[in-house]
Amino acid sequence: MTSVRPPEPNELVPLDYFSPLDLASYFNKDGPLEVDLGCGDGRFTLEMAENYPERNFLAVERLLGRVRKVCRGAERRGLENVRVLRLESLYTLEWLLPEGSVDRLHLLCPDPWPKVKHHRRRLFQRPFLQAVQRVLKQKGELLFKTDHEEYFEWCEEHLGEFSGLERLSWEEDEFFYPKTDFQIQWEAEGKHLQGLRARRVV
């Protein structure tokens, strides 16, 4: 008989993986919802949650070791506004997040899949943008960063062809936005990250 893994503190384990989440039942208080797709070690999510205690944060990550790290980090910091979901990002957007439920969606340093034969695996393309448009509230925002120049251009092109989101300016230090573990590593190597910020318009 297969044993069921007990959930980590702050882990969001859906009762049904085929129906939209009742988000209010997983967070202790109402507030704007921010979603961090592919949250890695959770540095970004945890710092955001500390700086914006009035907001709720859902970190999405498919790797169990990272999920455990983020959950335990939130517990150590006493953050009651963080939940962590172990699942694929696109599936979460398409099937679990309710329509019009997200205020800000973050996609930071995803795998650029640099080889041409692997471009079909890139997350940032039309099905992703359609799912983003569905889950964002009116005027909700998508924030994206990458250190990969060609992938950034790919994302600019796909965003420009998609009418459901309009691009916004994003000045450095315009608002509090901590660095991810990947960003710190790459900047130490002399790499520069580029960002896209877009808002739902329809």
Image (cartoon, grey):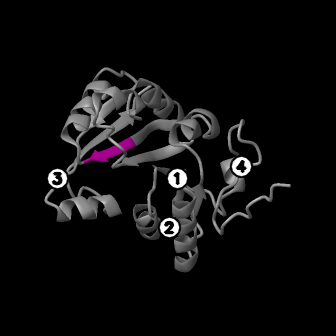
Quarter of the rendering occupied by the C terminus: top left
Q: Residue 14, which numbered label?
A: 4
What crowding class fits label 1: few (fewer than 14 Cα within 10 Å), some (14-19), or many (20 or more)? many
Q: Judge depth for marks 2 and 4 and give the one in front.
A: 4
Bin the neighbour count of mark 2 within 10 Å (Cα to Cα): few under 14, some 14-19, many 20 and up.
Answer: some
The stretch in magenta equals 142-146
Q: Do the residues labelled 1 and 2 touch (CB within 8 Å)?
A: no
Q: Which of marks 3 and 2 is nearer the N terminus?
A: 2
Query: What is the quadrant of residue 158 in the picture?
Result: top left
Q: Nearer the viewer, mark 1 or mark 4?
A: 1
Which residue corresponds to mark 2?
Answer: 53
Residue 192: within the magenta? no
Q: How far apart are marks 1 and 4 (CA)?
A: 14 Å
Marks 3/2: CA–CA distance: 30 Å
Q: Distance between the residues labelled 2 and 4?
A: 24 Å
Which-is-in-front pick, marks 1 and 2? 1
Q: Quadrant of residue 125?
A: top left
Whichever of labels 1 and 3 marks the residue nearer the N terminus, that label is: 1
Asked if residue 180 can be seen in this view, the reply is: no
N-term-proximal mark, 1 vs 4: 4
Secondary structure at badge 3 equals loop
Q: Which mark is residue 61?
A: 1
**Residue 136 visible from this viewpoint:** yes
- Of badges 3 and 2, nearer the viewer stands 3
How busy is the neighbourhood of tag 3: few (under 14 within 10 Å), some, or many (20 plus)?
Answer: few
**Mark 4 belongs to which amino acid?**
Pro
Q: In this view, which residue lies farthest toward the front? A: 1
Would residue 121 appear left or right of 183 to someone viewing this image?
right
Residue placed under numbered mark 3 in the picture: 192
